[in-house]
Amino acid sequence: MSRQLTWRWKKGWSTEERDMAERISVDANGDFVFMGDTTTMLEGLNRLRLNNTFCDVILCCGGKEFPCHRNVLVSFSCYFEAMFTVEWMETRQMRVAIHGVEPLGLEMLVGYAYSSKVVISAANVQALLAAANLLNVMAVQEACCHYMERRMDETNCVGIHCFAEAHSCKTLAQRSMEYILTHFSVVFRQEEFLSLSVEKVTQILSSENLDVPKEEMVVEAALLWLNTCPTHRHTFEKVLEQIRLPLISPSYLHDVIESLDVVKESQGCQRLIAETKDPNLMQYSRRARPRGCRVREVMLVVHESYKRCYAEIFDPRTNRWKSLVARLPLPVSGHSVIVSGSSLYVAGGNSRGNSTSREMRRYDLRDPTQEPCDLSCGPWLQMASMDVARSEFGLVMLDGYMYAVGGCSRVLDPTSRDWYYPVFVERYDPDMNTWQPMMSVDRSECKSSPRDVIALDGLIYRFGAVTTDGVLLSRVKKYDPKTSIWTNCEPMQFPRTDFAVCTLKGNIYVIGGDCPTELTSNTYTDKVECYNPQTNQWRMCAPMKQRRFRPGVAVVDGNIYVLMGSEDSQVLGGGLRDIERYNDERDTWRIVGELPTNLFICDESMRCFSLRLADVYAQTPSSS
């Protein structure tokens, strides 16, 4: 360690003497440490280079030659360090060819290596940035990006963006794209925009952040681009698909767009126009949503009773609830529910006659941020039926497919008291609307629950079970759809039933439930276990604030939220209204809210899901 020497200034000291004092410090032993001027050394090295003295390599680029010193090049560029320190051909060559850069850029970088100074101007910035990117001189590359960003305007932002992408300048590419979207009303009239490829045009026009007063301006930009080059006609369908046609007035759509020859001659364009005029099809389409929509993650709570499906939206950031209602077309109970994208699926279950159903229905959720938000005004769509009738079974989404696992059935004899336990796993393809039985079976005749099945990293996991003799199991099994094989995993530390299960950061959490091993008359538990599939090991987590039987759970914004459920097995009902949140990094639970008073809080068929919704905050549709 050293400290700056304190001088008592003497009258008459010259500037040189004061400079000398500022360069001297004292180390721990009391010795003077003098700091010289590094620019003197650099100037000396540069003179040697200019006089071709002691130079041991000549860089050749575009017919020009630049004598240099290897040690200087290695000291400022990782590119040259790799070239001259690894046993490559160039290591011992006197003349080394540099390709992919302009001589001007290379000359300026060599000068920077010997002076730590470079003058950036509009005439040299592109050549300099390209050379700095190739030779991995990050300081100069960042300085060039900063220069281009500071001089960005409506006439050059598109060119800057394309140049930044070509040279992997991610920050500059992002900021130039933001500039394009923000100033689009001027940018689209510039020559740089009109010469863009169809891929880049569609990228810009598809953006949610495209700042336009009305969608007709996007049409105007597309038509300008179309008329710039005859070849653009062949790809205009891709451009038209990015325009929010439902937001355009019907008269403009008819008079301007449908009258275009390129639209009349293209079946794809005709299809887009026809889809725009179908309100049922456009009701849930991204193209019918105004631009400027931010996405937020909320919790969807679905609970059912005979002939009615209730849904509640909970936003943890605002601690607010919104109620939705959708009437089921048939009275069923014991069915399974799942959300995929913006669609709600209800499958299986028992009717009032106690027969088990194979049917499945889908409801396409309207964006609850937009009015009206009553789900009862839309139809339930009849989907393909399962091959096996099921009740109280697991329903999970994995890699775009839906899987039905376990459950029970009385389909063979509805009047019988004996239950049949389906052992086949079924897979549903939403695109093809077909079910397919999987090869493998889980032959353990055990009662399972819709709550004990979850999917993670290409596998399906089942936690716990109850045998036909009523024995509670702590077993864990995983199913691989690729091999159709069930495999045993490390069992849970506590056998339990009617618990909640969720995934967070590659781990699986088992939460609450009924645990007969509790040493109290109240067997409902607050215990939380965490399973690591990579190590096949369990660990205990901090317990919840309250015991919960049949709780609901969802992961929103990286936190686990638990709600509903009963807290006392000795009290009928005993429903909870507090909402708890778990932080996995701190291993702590907090009560962060409560349920609305109109919500039935002890529902056997209740499920919770995370849901991504759009916040409309900018544009409104054009009037017709």
Image (tube, rainbow, N blue to C red):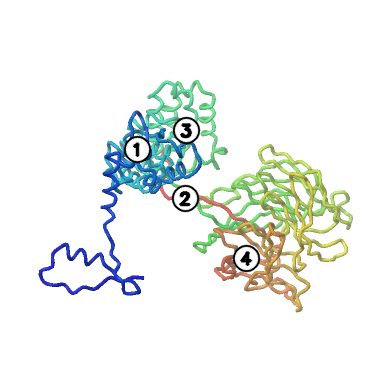
Q: CA distance from mark 3 to mark 4?
A: 46 Å
Measured in 3D between alpha carbons, the distance from the residue under mark 1 to the one under mark 4, in whole angstroms, is 64 Å
Asked if the residue at tag 4 contacts the one at tag 1, i.e. Cβ–Cβ closer than 8 Å, the answer is no
Q: Which residue is mark 1?
A: 106
Residue 193 is drawn in which quadrant?
Answer: top left
Neighbourhood count class around disc 1 (C-alpha, 10 Å): few under 14, some 14–19, many 20 upward: many
Looking at the rendered structure, the kind of residue marked 1 is Leu
- The residue that label 3 is drawn on is 199
Dot in front, 3 or 2: 3
Amino acid at circle 2: Arg
Image x and y of residue 510, in percent: 69, 64
Q: Nearer the viewer, residue 16 or 293?
A: 16
Q: The residue tagged with tag 2: helix, strand or loop?
A: strand
Which class describes the residues within 10 Å of circle 3: few (<14), some (14-19), or many (20+)?
few
Q: Is residue 406 above or below residue 234?
A: below
Q: Quadrant of the N terminus?
A: bottom left
